[in-house]
Image (spheres, rainbow, N blue to C red):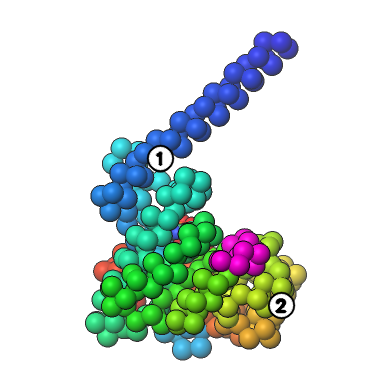
Amino acid sequence: VREAGGDNIVSLSKATHKALNRRSIVEKRLLLALDQRNLDVYYQPLMDAHTNEIIAMEALVRWHDEEIGTVTPDELIPIAEETGLINEIGKFMLEKACLQAVEWQAQGYSLKVSINSSVREFRDKNMAQSILETIARTECPVELIQLEITEKFALEAESEASIMSQMRKLEQEGITFILDDFGTGYASFRYMQLLPMNVLKIDQTFIASMLKSDKSTQIVNGMVQFGKSMGFIVIAEGVENEDQVNMLKQFGCDILQGYYIGKPALPRELSSLLNV
Ligand code: C2E
Ligand code: CA
Ligand code: CA
Ligand code: CA
């Protein structure tokens, strides 16, 4: 018994040690990757549920490092948020997305482009100004840019005057805010009234389970009706099959996103979707 207990303590500290070690390696390689602009931006299409047209793309970071391999966003983003490197990732993603939006426009497509923002980026008092500068420098029409913020972000923003005023400024300039991961546990009627937002995206976990029981179906229906009654444009993410598409259209959902519409991909791989 004593030996087993001892083993446990040793393996626990080993695991912690391993995790810390991994974190510092990821951080070191990430610094280098940002310096060399060695990250990729994939885009996932969003389809208008009323017209079946692709109307927007969400920019998602991808990182394959030659030494440590592929690092998924689920590992990368929390580390970047802790170390502050998320600010650099955000700037990189925004610039790439602006240039891509301009390119799509030149090709005759009017596509909005969404970038995911972390609350930590908005703790920088110059965030709004920096965003507007990048948009101006890349000559991207400001109305094409959308920022996705999570419910967790919204809840914190509500009590931080500087974040709120930066969001208001961006919204006045023509940027759209999308409330991402809607329903995952932080929803508050108050911030939905206070923050300058009129688009919400129902979290993919609800879409994944929506056809599994009557209750799950009615939860999604309820979320769509709630959003619409608040005057929000409602997006469903994680749409993977035709049955979900039909049900969501029936509920009056405005925009659909998910593998069934299109997986995240490089712009050149998306042209066939746009040409239909
Ligand atoms: P998210 O913003 O909720 O993005 C949606 C995630 O679901 C993406 O994962 C996407 O690839 C995946 N997805 C899309 N359609 C489907 C589907 O039909 N089925 C399933 N099972 N999954 C689908 P990804 O790219 O791994 O990103 C994970 C999260 O990492 C994102 O969740 C977002 O919170 C964060 N993230 C990604 N890129 C960035 C970035 O540039 N900046 C920030 N701050 N966060 C990012
Ligand atoms: Ca998102
Ligand atoms: Ca989401
Ligand atoms: Ca998510």
- Main SS of the magenta segment? helix
Amino acid type of the residue that numbered disc 1 sits on in the rendered structure: Val
Relative to 70, say whether 262 is above or below.
Answer: below
Q: Mark 1 highlights which residue?
A: 26
- Work out whether mark 2 precedes mark 1 in sequence or the reverse, and give the earlier one: 1
- In this view, the residue farthest toward the right is 215
Q: Give 41 or 208, whichever is nearer the viewer.
A: 41
Q: Residue at x 55, y 72 (%)?
A: 165
Residue drawn at 38 percent across, 55 percent down: 88
Kindly give the residue lying farthest to the bottom in the view shown: 51
The residue labelled by disc 2 is 222
Image coordinates for residue 3, horizontal then vertical, percent: 67, 10
Vertical relation: 65 (above or below) 54: above
Image coords of residue 264 (percent x, y): 39, 64
Q: How many labels were placed on the picture? A: 2
Mark 2 and mark 1 residues within 8 Å of each other at the beta carbon: no
Q: CA distance from mark 2 to mark 1?
A: 41 Å
Quadrant of the frame with the C terminus: bottom left
Q: Establish if 274 lies above or below 68.
A: below
Q: Which residues are magenta?
A: 151-163
Residue 116: image location, x then y, percent: 47, 64
Residue situated in front as seen by the camera: 134 or 74: 134
Is 236 displayed left or right of 275 in the figure?
Answer: right
Q: Is residue 134 visible?
A: yes
How far across and how far down the image is residue 5, in percent? 69, 16
SS assignment at label 1: helix
Tell me the residue at 41%/82% (across/down). Answer: 143
The amino acid sitting under disc 2 is Gly
Q: Secondary structure at mark 2?
A: helix
Q: Nearer the viewer, residue 173 or 100?
A: 173
